[in-house]
Image (tube, helix red, strand yellow):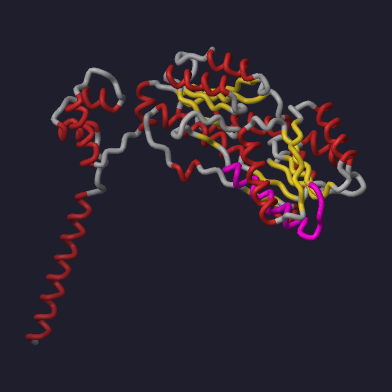
Amino acid sequence: MASSFLGTCLKSVAFDRNFNEKKQMNTAGPQMRPTTKDLAIEAGVSLATVDRVLNDRPGVRQDTIAKVNQAIQKLGFIRNVVAANLARGKSYRFLFLLPRTGDAFLAGLIARIDEANQIFAAEMVHADVMHIHESDPHQIAHALGSLDLDQVDGVAIMAPESPQVRDAKARLIEKGIDTVSFIAGQITSGHDDFVGIDNHAAGATAGRLMGRFLERSAGTILIIAETMLARDSLERRLGFDEIINIDYPHLTVLPSLETYGDAERTARIIRNSFSSQHSIAGVYIVSSEARVPLEVVTEVFAKDKPVIIAHERTPFTEAALRSHQVDALITQDPGHLVRSAIRILRARRDRREILASQEKIRIEVLITENL
């Protein structure tokens, strides 16, 4: 009897303790995120002062800024930038500076920009496109120089390397307009933002594929580019040469043929190379737009097709891969490229750090079997 009574008492105590613990958890509710009011109380300043510090506005002493920043760290305050921008009616105006030539690859980029405008519309983000003559650095510099902060907040620039473009980009930054190098690359400093694949690694990947495809075949390799002034083409060529020269000495890489995006010139220089070089075993198209070079190469090498490796997935290159005219494509996701450029420009405008892992563009290798 005594032991039974004691057991009942112990169960009752345990039940009461569990009930009280659950009750305390339920009444406590989820922990609220710290607000700007909490920051003001913790820092001992007004809400207006907190707002000035968060929005990087003048009129606040350095010691006061330090107090607010310390409060941010202590409370773990995370600012809801989207909500703040909506409340103030703030919008973001971005511009993509793209070449006039580019055919299917360029059309794909523009379609992805249109998609991004729909995706980011609720966050007050809109991106426009301006076309440039990529072979005229003075015209590109003039276009950049015509931009002002009351027109645009940030620019994604897809342009070949040149001193004129580099200096114009630096002047944009001085005006307070954020910039990002887009696909082609136009590096101005060690802190410059770049959206695109690691082009040296992409070229090395092409070299490895070419070497494996031609492991038992000696011969020469034709390199075709729009211009070797473009950083992406230059880095791809360097990466390609490294692999071929070290690991596949039975293959000889020819000097780069530059088409400058001109269909007539493309046909002429490829035909001339074919007539002067009788042992072409491979063709590597390093530029982003491959349609015209592929059409000419396919026609010239109708009987003895060499191994062909190109860049970027477009309707044309995909069809060429399916029909075995192309052996492999090295690609980057154009949608990811566009969204990443917009996210980086927006982060720079808000003076926020970017999430580097989210903005890393992957190199993808496509063959017929994994389309």
Residue at point 60%, 42% (across, down): 199
Of residues 107 and 65, the one drawn nearer to the viewer in this rendering: 65
From this viewpoint, is residue 207 visible? yes
Of residues 46 and 340, the one drawn nearer to the viewer in this rendering: 340
In the image, the segment drawn in magenta is 198-220
Q: Position of residue 335 (x, y in %)?
A: 59, 38
Relative to residue 34, is residue 105 drawn left or right? right
Relative to residue 221, is residue 242 drawn left or right? left
Q: Position of residue 95 (x, y in %)?
A: 54, 23
Q: Is residue 87 above or below residue 209?
A: above
Of residues 58 and 40, the one drawn nearer to the viewer in this rendering: 58
Q: Is residue 256 above or below residue 219?
A: above
Q: Is residue 65 above or below residue 277?
A: above
Residue at point 89%, 45% (across, down): 278
Relative to residue 74, is residue 138 drawn left or right? right
Residue at point 68%, 32% (across, down): 228
Quarter of image, res 218: bottom right
Q: Position of residue 349 (x, y in %)?
A: 41, 26
Residue at point 17%, 68% (across, down): 15
Q: Position of residue 315 (x, y in %)?
A: 74, 39
* Secondary structure character of the magenta stretch overall: helix
In the image, is residue 212 part of the stretch drawn in magenta?
A: yes
In the image, is residue 284 part of the stretch drawn in magenta?
A: no
From this viewpoint, is residue 318 visible? no
